[in-house]
């Protein structure tokens, strides 16, 4: 049901808000790094899409072993090169490939449209919690550089987002499930597991969500409500 057909949700809600690709751009920089890597690899048998599929497979393996973050991504690029290239991996090649990944860290934080003013307004009526996943140092650094930390009651950097971790956040802060909403762009990490944990959720689509975060929305994953807004700024009409 579109938010415009709903009454505004009353004040005093607990809003858990995702960071990467919800508050600021993230995946576009990884996509550029992958494009540079594929161009550098210049494989003569695999198409760029086929190289991507191998990389996604390697990334899945790496995440299970090393978690999320720049180091894990750089290692995935190296292992993908080793798997596909007939050329041996020299120290110079290793450094070049790592450079594709670590160039991401040089990008300034690019806040998405209407985010600061929306957070400022929502923080007057509700309790905001920033709930992100990834490498603690990297994610905490982005939060500090974003200039958005002041709007949040607390910041949680999780190793993974699943129903168990949402339950732990609820218990840690003594939140009421019937008044708690997870807001984000990822069906896999933000929406479906939050619903499974008995929370409500708001899906804010991003045009370039990471392949490993995509998936079908499962509105019946729990008893909570699932809403969708076309942009972050539209949250002001809902809450």
Image (cartoon, rainbow, N blue to C red):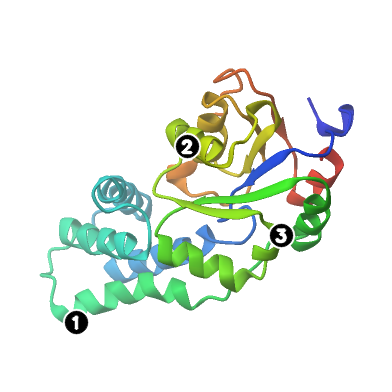
Q: Quadrant of the C terminus?
A: top right
Q: Identify the disc placed on residue 100.
A: none
Tell me where residue 110 sits by quadrant: bottom right
Residue 28 in the image: x percent, y percent? 53, 61
Residue 114 in the image: x percent, y percent? 78, 59
What residue is disc 2 on? 168
- Say which of marks 1 and 2 sits in front: 2
The answer to the question of whether label 3 and label 2 lie on touching residues, with beta carbons closer than 8 A, is: no
- Distance, label 1 to label 2, CA atoms, is 44 Å
Q: Is residue 188 among the parts visible in the rendering?
A: yes
Question: Which residue is at 78% across, 39% downward?
Answer: 12
Depth order, front residue of 119/83: 119
Q: Identify the disc placed on residue 151.
A: 3
- Say which of marks 3 and 1 sits in front: 3
| Dot 2: element | helix
Badge 1: residue crowd in 10 Å (few <14, some 14–19, many ≥20): few
Residue situated furthest bottom in the rendering: 92
Residue 56 in the image: x percent, y percent? 33, 48
For marks 3 and 2, the one nearer the N-term is: 3
Depth order, front residue of 3/134: 134
Does residue 46 appear to the left or right of 102 in the view shown? left
- Distance, label 3 to label 1, CA atoms, is 44 Å
Residue 165 in the image: x percent, y percent? 45, 38
Question: Which residue is at 21% across, 74% downward?
Answer: 94
What residue is disc 1 on? 92
For marks 3 and 1, the one nearer the N-term is: 1
| Dot 3: element | helix
| Vertical side of 91 occupied by 180: above or below | above
């Amino acid at each position: 049901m579109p938010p415009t057909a709903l009454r505004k949700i009353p004040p005093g809600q607990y809003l858990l808000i995702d960071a990467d690709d919800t508050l600021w751009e993230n995946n576009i920089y990884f996509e550029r790094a992958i494009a540079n890597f594929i161009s550098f690899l210049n494989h003569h048998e695999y198409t760029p899409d086929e190289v991507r599929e191998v990389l996604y497979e390697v990334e899945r393996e790496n995440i299970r072993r090393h978690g999320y973050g720049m180091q894990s991504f750089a290692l995935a690029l190296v292992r993908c090169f080793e798997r596909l290239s007939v050329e041996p991996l020299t120290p110079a090649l290793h450094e070049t490939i790592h450079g594709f990944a670590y160039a991401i860290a040089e990008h300034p934080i690019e806040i998405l449209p209407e985010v600061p003013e929306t957070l400022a307004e929502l923080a007057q009526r509700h309790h905001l919690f920033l709930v992100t996943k990834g490498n603690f140092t990297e994610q905490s650094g982005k939060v500090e550089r974003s200039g958005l930390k002041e709007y949040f009651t607390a910041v949680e950097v999780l190793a993974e987002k699943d129903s168990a971790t949402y339950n732990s956040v609820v218990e840690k802060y003594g939140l009421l499930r019937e008044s708690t909403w997870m807001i984000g762009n990822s069906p896999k990490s933000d929406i479906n597991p939050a619903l499974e944990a008995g929370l409500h959720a708001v899906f804010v689509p991003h045009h370039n969500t990471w392949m490993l975060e995509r998936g079908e929305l499962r509105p019946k994953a729990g008893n909570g409500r699932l809403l969708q807004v076309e942009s972050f700024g539209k949250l002001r009409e809902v809450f």
